[in-house]
Amino acid sequence: MAKPIVAIVGRPNVGKSTLFNKIAGKRIAIVEDEPGVTRDRIYTEVEWLTHQFTLIDTGGIEPESEEIIPAQMRRQAELAIETAHVIVFMVDGRQGLISSDREIADMLRKSKKPVLLVLNKVDTKEQSAHLFDFYELGIGEPIEISSALGLGIGDMLDEIVKHFPEEGMEDYDEEVIKVAIIGKPNVGKSSIINKILGEDRVIVSNIAGTTRDAIDTPFTDGEDQYVFIDTAGIRRKSKIKEHVEKYSVVRAIAAVERADVCLLVIDAEEGVTEQDKKIAGFSHENGKGLIIVINKWDLIEKETNTMNQFTKDIRNELSYCEYAPILFVSAVTGQRMNKILEKIKFVANQNAMRIPTGTLNEVVGEAMLLNQPPSDKGKRLKIFYATQASVKPPTFILFINDRELMHFSYQRYIENRIRENFGFEGTPIRFINREKA
Ligand code: GDP
Ligand code: GDP
């Protein structure tokens, strides 16, 4: 199920990243931090009451210590309006209202998105001396918080989750395979889309449940239903290319959030970039299927080992998603383009695969026989029982005697045995260790 996106906007120095870090610091980690998943984040997963959402700090994408230009601020607000379900508009309660606050407020007010006006730096129990000035912005009642001291944040989160759509966020029926095509500008995303759609596929606008056909491209291939998510951003060719590259990461995050399978497109001549790592990391953490597409393969001079060498380099750069299949294609010559859709369908199925409990326990039992669980101070790890709790991504619960004894390397070993037996190609899998007396 796609989670809502909440974006924090506001001019520099009002305290956006302080708030972001305060909330991110408290997050209940679903996935352990893994080496390689980048630390320099602009998003975090948040759980509040029964809700889960993705929080994005749009200020975090500004180049540091560079004087902010109004155009950049406008772009930031636009991006929030395009991608977020709820916008947190932060102002400085100590400094009071200034003209650039008004500019951002004007843009946000015109959008149809719910906007929360948050007055930061209210560090005492007393209200800000400037509180009443902010009503003038026409965004409603300001919520007073202190990000630094952690005051008022719970009330603010309560207010945020009130604006989430009640009936959930699903745009399409379960059978429709949702695909996000992500990657830097110019790597060939729209060429790939055109090539795939150019063959016998029928573009339809009436796939059941479609609510976003303006930005998505739904199509069928025989019996199978697909939708390319947020193709508007990719295909809009007249667009002024995002001069701050990181802006497209925010867009990609919003697309990945809604997808079952992500196609990460990489330019063969350029290789893996920082941006690719961020997006692949997001896909991984959100349990999405992932396929790495090396495009413009026609431009590479090949020797016997070229493909192997490429594969090795990519595995090195994206070590946390070793499960992702790699396709070497050319949207221009059409080489291996017919494999893409096939792979998407396959990976979507792997991401949604369920293993019967009996079979699963045979494999886990055999794994323990082949390679004894670790022990510490005379106490040995025991896995009593395993069961698959959910899909998308496949998540396994291991009932064990002592969580302290489950080392990362043994967990990895179990994961590998499960993959050897069942596949799960293209999807992350997760484990929850539960102690049983
Ligand atoms: P951003 O540019 O909007 O991301 O702002 P930062 O989070 O970098 O904060 C700018 C400055 O305001 C830093 O010096 C923070 O320590 C300070 N600051 C942030 N939140 C608060 C707060 O709640 N109270 C006070 N007194 N200072 C704060
Ligand atoms: P996007 O910005 O990621 O959507 O990239 P485009 O699809 O617009 O492609 C950018 C440029 O790369 C265009 O000039 C394409 O013709 C070119 N291009 C795309 N795919 C290939 C390919 O497989 N081989 C070569 N040689 N050029 C390609």
Image (spheres, rainbow, N blue to C red):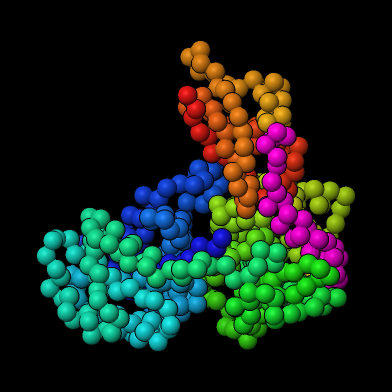
State which quadrant residue 261 falls in: bottom right
State which quadrant residue 104 falls in: bottom left
In the displayed image of the protein, which residue is found farthest to the top? 378
Q: Taking 328 as reference, is 73 left or right? A: left
| Residue 396 position within the rendered picture, expressed as x and y whole percent measured from the top left | 60, 40
In the rendered image, the vertical position of residue 189 relative to residue 238, given as above or below? above
> In this view of the protein, can residue 337 be seen by the observer?
yes
Residue found 46% across the figure and 61% down from its top:
54
Residue found 55% across the figure and 70% down from its top:
251
> In this view of the protein, can residue 274 be seen by the observer?
no
Number of callouts: 0
| Residue 422 position within the rendered picture, expressed as x and y whole percent measured from the top left | 75, 41
State which quadrant residue 419 falls in: top right
Q: Is 343 part of what is drawn in magenta? A: yes
In the rendered image, the vertical position of residue 223 relative to residue 309, given as above or below? below
| Magenta span: chief secondary structure | helix
Q: Give whichever of 122, 76 is nearer the camera.
A: 122
Q: Give whichever of 91, 223 is nearer the camera.
A: 223
Residue found 78% across the figure and 73% down from its top:
220
| Residue 285 position within the rendered picture, expressed as x and y whole percent measured from the top left | 55, 52
| Residue 136 position within the rendered picture, expressed as x and y whole percent measured from the top left | 23, 85
- Which quadrant would the N terminus be assigned to in this image? bottom right
Residue found 39% across the figure and 70% down from its top:
163
Q: Taking 401 as reference, is 184 left or right? A: right
Q: Taking 244 as reference, is 312 left or right? A: right
Assign ligand 1 to one image quadrant.
bottom left
Q: Which region of the structure is painted magenta?
A: 332-360
Q: Is 281 part of what is drawn in magenta? A: no
Q: Give whichever of 210, 347 is nearer the camera.
A: 210
